[in-house]
Image (spheres, rainbow, N blue to C red):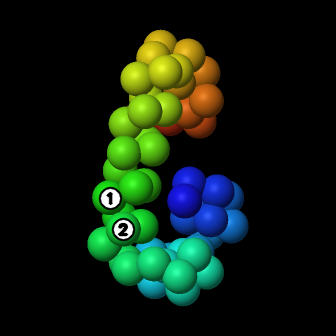
Amino acid sequence: MLVLRFWADLSVEQTAAALDCAPGTVKSQTSDALANLRRTLGAALDDLRPNRKA
């Protein structure tokens, strides 16, 4: 899900079509996967964020 949604830049609908599932499944699985990544990476995730200047 994450690769298709963010790396391949597909929409929810395009991802659902590619995986032959419902858009709601894409949304819930994407949410779960992002939460898992955040939990796993913890503070290391900050290193992956682009520098933002105010």
Instruction: Say whether residue 53 is left or right of residue 24.
Output: right
x%, y% of residue 53? 49, 34
Where 11 sits versus 38, above or below? below
Task: Report if the CB atoms under discs 2 and 1 are less than 8 Å apart.
Answer: yes
| Residue 15 picture location, percent across and down | 54, 75
Visible residue check, residue 14? no
In the rendered structure, find residue 25 and report the number of the disc placed on it: 2
| Residue 42 seen | yes
At label 1, counting other C-alpha atoms closer than 10 Å, the crowd grade (few under 14, some 14-19, many 20 or more) is few
Residue for point 49% across, 32% down: 37
Could you tell me how far apart the alpha carbons at marks 2 and 1 are, in whole angstroms?
Answer: 5 Å
In this rendering, the answer to whether 33 lies above or below 25 is above
Identity of the residue drawn at 60% across and 21% down: 47
Q: Residue at x 62, y 65 (%)?
A: 4
The quadrant the N terminus occupies is bottom right
Tell me the tag on residue 28: 1
Of 41 and 22, the residue lying toward us:
22
Give the answer, above or below, for where 17 lies relative to 7. below
Quarter of the picture holding the C terminus = top left
Number of the label disc, if any, that sits on residue 14: none
What is the quadrant of residue 39 in the picture?
Answer: top left
Q: Percent x, y for residue 5? A: 55, 64
Question: From this viewpoint, which residue is outermost toward the front?
Answer: 20
Q: Amino acid at mark 2?
A: Thr
Most distant residue in the right direction: 8
